[in-house]
Image (cartoon, grey):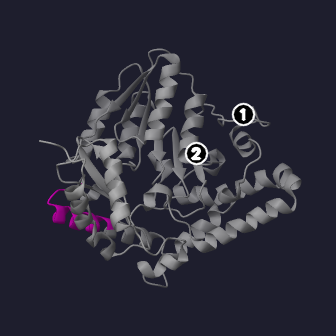
Amino acid sequence: MNAPAFPYGHSLKPMFHLRSDMIYLNHGAYGATLRDVLDYQRGWVERMEAQPARFFMKDLPGLIRQAVEVLAPEVGADPVKTVMVENATSGVNAILRSLNFQPGDRIVTTDHVYNAVRNILRYVVDRVGAEFVEVPVAMPLADPGSMVERILRECNSRTRLVVVDHIASPSGIVFPVDEIVRLCQSKGIQVLVDGSHAPGMIEPDIGRVGADWYVGNCHKWMGAPKGAAFIAVGPANETEIHPSIISHAYGKGLVDEFAKIGTRDASAWLSVPFAIEAHGRLGGRAMRARNRQLAIAGGRAVAGELGTEMGAPESCFGAMTTVRIPAGIKADHEAAAKLREALWSDHRIDAIVAPISGALWVRLCAYAYNQDSDFSSVAGAIRDAVKTAGWRERS
């Protein structure tokens, strides 16, 4: 279903549990789940509790497979090589901990990497004496091709793995992952794509991308309950990976191992097919296009009012855009956190603020419940926070 039966904007807010008194421009953080999807999830919890032993020991592995059979075609993945995990960070952990890095091996990513993934990479290289390289991707980004060149420039004979975002969390930039994967693999380098924000924001075709591993979240833009994500293993990749928690099914193969790692609530996973259906009822492709248009128009308007700029050409954004905050504030994490808190406490605006390339940037997300007026007060709120804050940069 690609056409909604209702108008987008604030009239949809009652379909979610969102507070009515806030301007929520932070859908990319944890998503927002429809009430009826949460009701559906409760049905799985009740079924689990009705006969816990049989549910976990007999029913659950097959139910997970049924959910994957629905999910995989939505993201262009092979269901036989797709498994569920709690979140993309869990997926990255499982992959990296399954690989045997050696002293001197080189892992390359960019400085737009999600911080949790950065920490996993640091942990892996610190344990064995490998090398971790972050390629700077300057903002504002003038040419998407320049990031490809910079990544390849850091890939030498010791480079074992490249980790790249499909849509970068701090900046909202959609990376040219198809080209990055193709060029890296032509040099014999494996590639892990962090697609946390892709499912439900754009239409990822994981098979076409061809990465060795692709991780994605279902609880952000796809609208599943919190704790639903996946790993998709590339068609030509025979590297054996295991869940971070080794349990009863060790050695029985990808699907069995990830389906049985102990007692946990898998209701979010089992709700993914219903969430995909609900996403379609909200408009599916039409909603995704509308979200993107609203985010870009909103970002353009905020940048114009602030007299600054967006973080990249409009063609590089999906439903998240970034706008530079005017100079005068230290571009560090402490200042970013204070500015974000000021936006919330004084204006009830929730949006991510992050330091990138020597400046602070505000990330603006658009979803079905947002409308133009959500963006109209952002610039004024930022100016007010900058003007009144006691943590401005001193000249």
Q: Secondary structure at mark 2?
A: strand
Does 267 sit above or below residue 6?
above
Q: Secondary structure at mark 1?
A: loop
Instruction: Locate residue 19, reporting x and y percent.
Output: 48, 71
Q: What span is colored magenta in the figure?
A: 295-310
Q: Quadrant of the C terminus?
A: top left
- Whether residue 304 appears in magenta in the rendering, the answer is yes
Q: Is residue 37 left or right of residue 213?
A: right
Q: Is residue 337 visible?
A: yes
Q: Is residue 58 left or right of residue 7?
A: right
Q: Residue at x 43, y 42 (%)?
A: 114
Q: Residue at x 75, y 57 (%)?
A: 63
Q: Which mark is residue 231?
A: 2
Q: Residue at x 52, y 65 (%)?
A: 32
Name the dominant secondary structure of the magenta segment. Answer: helix
Q: CA distance from mark 1 to mark 2?
A: 16 Å
- Closer to the camera in the image, 377 or 178: 377
- Closer to the camera in the image, 233 or 307: 307
- Report the residue that reaches farthest toward the left: 395
Specify which label sits upstream in the sequence, 1 or 2.
2
Crowd band around label 1 with a 10 angstrom C-alpha radius: few (<14), some (14–19), many (20+): some
Instruction: Locate residue 308, reporting x and y percent.
Output: 16, 57
Instruction: Locate residue 181, reporting x and y percent.
Output: 41, 39
Which residue in the structure is indicated by mark 1?
A: 246
- Whether residue 107 appears in magenta in the rendering, the answer is no
Does 133 sit above or below residue 388?
above
Crowd band around label 2 with a 10 angstrom C-alpha radius: few (<14), some (14–19), many (20+): many
